[in-house]
Amino acid sequence: MFEKDIDIDYELIIKNKVPILTMDNDWKKIFGNSKNKDINNYKNILNDLIKEQRELSRRLVQLKTKKKKLMAMILNLSHEINNNSNSRAVEKLDECQSEIHTINEEIETYTFKLEMLPKEIRAANLSLLKATIKVAYKDIKSNQEELNSLCSQIDELREKLKNLIETKHEKEEAINKTYSFLHGILGSKEMERLDAELLYSK
């Protein structure tokens, strides 16, 4: 039952806005410490992708900031070259332009990766969801079987308790009838003596 692939309607997942499972508190409470191999495998893949996404975003911000500073430097250097004929500024300008070229290539690479990552993250999240469903239903089935057994035991105990209560009432009724009969014949004083002698003596 649990070895076959789980068929999930992807459109339904989008409609229900399924969260990134490893970032969902409810999922972490129930499955975060699962020993299941598939859950741990997809959990690690998903976490690595999210970590990569954060790192690329951070790096992209750094590159854009650096590029902005270089562009400002180029404007200043161009001014130096055009107005002051600064020969050293020409060399520095070439360095800045070369560095910007390298940064542009890195930005393009990181931007492309960041555009691809959401799709990879959704796929990893879907794989983790399928693994989670398998484990969830396995646990539900196991717990349901145990619950059914417990319910049967409770029903048996209830029936036993019911029988014990009926027996208790029968014994109390028998004692009361017998005691009432003897009390009517012998009287309370004699009954007290016999009680002390026959009922309460060790």
Image (tube, grey):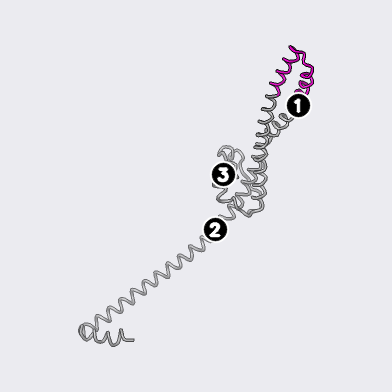
Of marks 2 and 3, which one's residue comes earlier in the chain? 3
**Tag 1: Cα neighbours inside 10 Å, few (<14), some, or many (≥20)?**
some
Query: Closer to the observer: label 1 or label 2?
Result: 1
Element assignment for label 1: helix
Of marks 1 and 3, which one's residue comes earlier in the chain? 3
Task: Read off the residue under disc 1.
Answer: 99
Of marks 1 and 2, which one's residue comes earlier in the chain? 1
**Mark 3: which amino acid?**
Asp
The span picked out in magenta is 70-99
Real-space Cα separation, disc 1 to disc 2, in angstroms: 62 Å
Task: Read off the residue under disc 3.
Answer: 24
Element assignment for label 2: helix
Q: Quadrant of residue 100?
A: top right
**Tag 2: Cα neighbours inside 10 Å, few (<14), some, or many (≥20)?**
few
Real-space Cα separation, disc 1 to disc 3, in angstroms: 41 Å
Real-space Cα separation, disc 2 to disc 3, in angstroms: 24 Å
Outermost residue, top side: 83
On screen, 110 above or below 30?
Answer: above
Q: Quadrant of residue 13?
A: top right
Q: Quadrant of residue 54?
A: top right
* Most foreground residue, 36 or 143: 36
- Whether 97 is among the magenta residues is yes
Q: Position of residue 80 (x, y in %)?
A: 73, 15
Q: Which mark is residue 143?
A: 2
Q: Chief secondary structure of the magenta span?
A: helix
